Image (spheres, grey):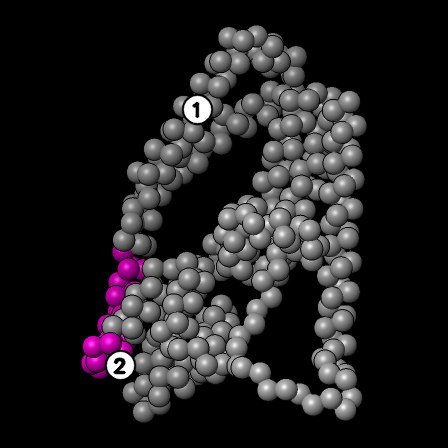
Amino acid sequence: MIFFLVSVLVFGAVAAAVVAITVRKQEQAADSLRSRVGAEKAGQRSRPEAPGIERDTRMSSVPFLDRLLQSMSFARKLEMLLYQAGATMRVGMFLLLVAAIAMVTYLVGYIVLGHLLPAFLCMGLGALVLPLIIWHKRNVRMAAFAEEFPDALDLLVSALRAGISFSSALQIVAEESPEPIRSEFAIVVEEQSLGVEMREALGNLASRVDSVDIKFFVTAIVLQRDTGGNLTEVLDNTSRLIRDRFRILGDIKTFTAQGRLTGAILTCLPMAMAIFMIASAPEYFFKMWEKPEGRTILGVAAFMQLLGALAIRKIVDIKV
């Protein structure tokens, strides 16, 4: 019965994903057609509208799923996570893909291993695959931004010393810097050209990029605009501060490498042994699971394992 219900859920998730992809392709085709022939009919005059910035805030191409996600608070955080990772998919498509992968891995685990517990374990691991990939891409993109940001500040300072205005200097950074610096500063320049104030555009930049360095930069710019002073010197000092932070962080990673490796091994070893026992000798492992005492021991062991991993992470995670 459970196998049948899960099969129905897999079919529903895959069907919903196909529908979402089809609707998205139709919307892209319609947008392309409107951009070619124009949104107004021939002979009609375009009425003047107030300038504004419009952004596609839909979280799914399916209207019902979009309304459901709009009412959930975690969907906004997930949307920001997808943006920071550089992913182009919507939140609804992401959740559908996670559900489809989880159900497929459940079916594979049930067919191969023949037990519900390892099948649910496979489903949990399958549900984590796509979020872990997105999280890894987000960390890589944010690390690349933090690594290239001091050079972008140096370019900005050089442009200001040459007598260029701050807005034009931002344009130069948006054109000459590598990704993801280029795309983020291009959004700032575009927002300015559409009438957004500099303070708000820089605040949006700080909210999009999860980096302490960019918050230092935005704070320095805002304070200089409020109190005055030499902007070139302020940005030069900010660049020097960021480079010093990188040097200190490199030293900390060197000193805590052994602790981080120990934590990773101690965290992964029990789970690897449990998976190995379930795959090689399930009858030996399930004897513990069938008794209440065994389940209690497993629960306590998992809880202590989680506490140990959190403690090791807290020790080696040194803030600068």
Most foreground residue, 214 or 76: 76
The correct choice, above or below, for 100 with respect to 301 in the image is below
Estimate the x, y position of residue 24 in percent, counting from the top left.
73, 61
Estimate the x, y position of residue 211 in percent, counting from the top left.
38, 60
Q: Amino acid at mark 1?
A: Phe
Q: Amino acid at mark 2?
A: Thr
Secondary element type, mark 2: helix
Q: Which residue is mark 2?
A: 232
Q: Is the residue under label 2 in contact with that under label 1 (CB below 8 Å)?
A: no
Report the predominant secondary structure element of the magenta stretch: helix
Most foreground residue, 165 or 155: 165
Spatial CA span between label 1 and label 2:
53 Å
Q: Quadrant of the N terminus?
A: top right
Question: Badge 2: how crowded within 10 Å, few (<14), some, or many (20+)?
Answer: some
Picture residue at 60% right of the left edge, 10% below the top: 290
Q: Which mark is residue 277?
A: none
Estimate the x, y position of residue 87 in percent, counting from the top left.
59, 59
Tell me which numbered mark, 1 or 2, is placed earlier along the sequence. 2
Question: Badge 1: how crowded within 10 Å, few (<14), some, or many (20+)?
Answer: few
Asked whether, in this view, residue 80 is left or right of residue 24, the answer is left
Q: Which residue is mark 1?
A: 303
The correct choice, above or below, for 131 with respect to 113 in the image is below
Residue 247 sits inside the magenta stretch: yes
Picture residue at 60% right of the left edge, 43% below the top: 129
Query: What's drawn in magenta, residue-wise?
Result: 224-248
Secondary element type, mark 1: helix
Q: Is residue 167 in sight in this rendering?
A: yes
Residue 311 quadrant: top left
The correct choice, above or below, for 6 with respect to 84 in the image is above
Asked whether, in this view, residue 97 is left or right of residue 232, the answer is right
Picture residue at 53% right of the left edge, 75% below the top: 53
